[in-house]
Amino acid sequence: MDLKSYESRDAVAQRLMKTNPRISADKARWLAQHWAAPDADGRWHVLGAAAHKIVTPMLFRADEMLALYEAITAPVLSIEAEENHIEKWSGGKYSLAQFHERLGHVRNARSAQVINAGHMLHHDQPEAVAQLIEEFLR
């Protein structure tokens, strides 16, 4: 399974702007050169694995996962975007409320929300995300 390739860095930037309307053209062009790279033929390929799009063939058992969450002893920071599409991406099988309920099983978890951000919140609000991480690490 391969991710789609693009004819140029500008085409990669257009793809970034299509899926994230908050990104300006100059930021998308900058991100494109770090998110993708050209091959020997000049086609640009995203520097990521397509595997994240594959639904696992293994049966998911929430009770087993919750037991693992309860075993976590390290502090955890969960940062979510104001614009959250978890229900849409899961086909209505998993809600944000369910995520929060499950996260509640991590004994030392903190949650934060980034306003005016979507799925790629680190692109939308990099300063806000960095500030949350810095505060968490103190």
Image (tube, grey):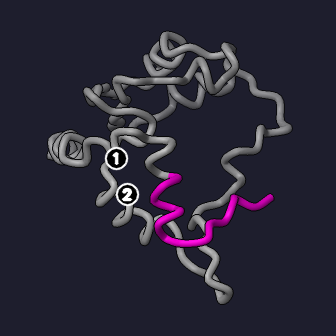
The residue shown at (27%, 30%) is 114
- Disc 1 to disc 2: CB gap under 8 Å: yes
Please name whichever residue, 24 or 76, is drawn nearer the observer in this view of the structure.
Answer: 24
- For mark 2, does the 10 Å Cα neighbourhood hold few (<14), some (14 to 19), or many (20 or more) residues? many
- For mark 1, does the 10 Å Cα neighbourhood hold few (<14), some (14 to 19), or many (20 or more) residues? many
* Residue 5, percent from left and from top: 66, 65
Decide whether residue 27 is among the magenta residues.
Answer: no
Three-letter amino acid code at the position of disc 1? Ile
Decide whether residue 3 is among the magenta residues.
Answer: yes
| Residue at the spot of label 1 | 23
* Residue 56, percent from left and from top: 79, 39
* Residue 2, percent from left and from top: 75, 61
Find residue 98 and report its image quarter: top right
Marks 1 and 2, how far apart in space? 6 Å
The dot on residue 75 is: none
Instruction: Using the image, determine if residue 23 lies above or below residue 60.
Output: below
Instruction: Using the image, determine if residue 8 lies above or below residue 22.
Output: below
Please name whichever residue, 24 or 74, is drawn nearer the observer in this view of the structure.
Answer: 24
* Residue 58, percent from left and from top: 83, 36
| Residue at the spot of label 2 | 28
The residue shown at (44%, 25%) is 106
The residue shown at (70%, 19%) is 91
Stretch in magenta: 1-15
Instruction: Using the image, determine if residue 61 lies above or below residue 38.
Output: above
First in sequence: mark 1 vs mark 2: 1
Three-letter amino acid code at the position of disc 2? Ala
Disc 2 secondary structure class: helix
Side of 17 relative to 39 (left or right) = left
Side of 81 relative to 69 (left or right) = left
Please name whichever residue, 101 or 54, is drawn nearer the observer in this view of the structure.
Answer: 54
The residue shown at (70%, 59%) is 3
